[in-house]
């Protein structure tokens, strides 16, 4: 059974769920530090949950900035996000039920 994803991984997958994003966009969207986002993206890529592609150098040169690496969810990443989201919702419900008594 594959290891379940933590909250940071789920937040990152959720941030790129609706399209392709580059690292700094993900940092801004999640509010997480780059020292968390970039290593997590590397692990998610290694596990096959995200795909990464460098943009063309000419585009970056034209805009006067470094090249960006764009990330998108793989089909496995979308499934992992759905399972993880369900798990978090179940845990939240259990915690709420436990505090009501």
Image: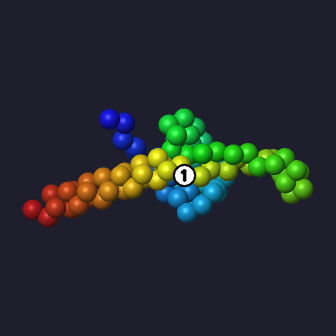
- Can you give x and y, in whole percent of width and height, for residue 31 in the image? 55, 56
Q: Quadrant of residue 54?
A: top right
Q: Is residue 32 visible?
A: no
> Splitting the image into 4 quarters, where does residue 28 fall?
bottom right
Q: Which residue is mark 1?
A: 73
Vertical side of 77 occupied by 18: above or below = below
User: Is residue 41 at least partly visible in the picture?
Assistant: yes
Q: Quadrant of the C terminus?
A: bottom left
Query: In the image, what residue occupies the spot 39% across and 55% down?
Result: 82
Point out residue 21 in the picture as x, y percentages from the top left corner.
64, 56
Q: Element under label 1? A: strand
In the rendered view, tell whether residue 39 sits above or below residue 92: above
* Side of 66 relative to 98 (left or right): right
Residue situated in front as seen by the camera: 30 or 18 = 18
Tell me if mark 1 has few (under 14), some (14-19) or many (20+) residues whose alpha carbon lies within 10 angstroms of its own: many
Tell me if 7 is positioned left or right of 22 in this view. Answer: left
Task: Using the rendered view, name the quadrant where residue 6 is placed.
Answer: top left
Task: Locate residue 63, reporting x and y percent.
Answer: 86, 57
Q: Nearer the viewer, residue 38 or 19?
A: 19
Question: Which quarter of the rendering shows the N terminus?
Answer: top left
Report the number of numbered marks.
1
Residue depicted at 76% across the width and 49% down the height? 55
Q: Residue at x 62, y 50 (%)?
A: 71
Front position in the image: 1 or 35: 1
């Amino acid at each position: 059974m594959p290891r379940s994803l933590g909250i940071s991984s789920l937040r990152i997958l959720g941030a790129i769920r609706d399209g392709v994003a580059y690292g700094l966009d993900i940092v801004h969207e999640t509010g997480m530090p780059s020292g968390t986002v970039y290593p997590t993206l590397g692990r998610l890529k290694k596990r096959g949950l995200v795909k990464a592609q460098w943009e063309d150098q000419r585009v970056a040169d034209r805009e006067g900035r470094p090249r960006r690496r764009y990330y998108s969810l793989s089909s496995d990443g979308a499934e992992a996000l759905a399972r993880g989201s369900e798990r978090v919702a179940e845990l939240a419900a259990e915690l709420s039920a436990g505090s009501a008594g």
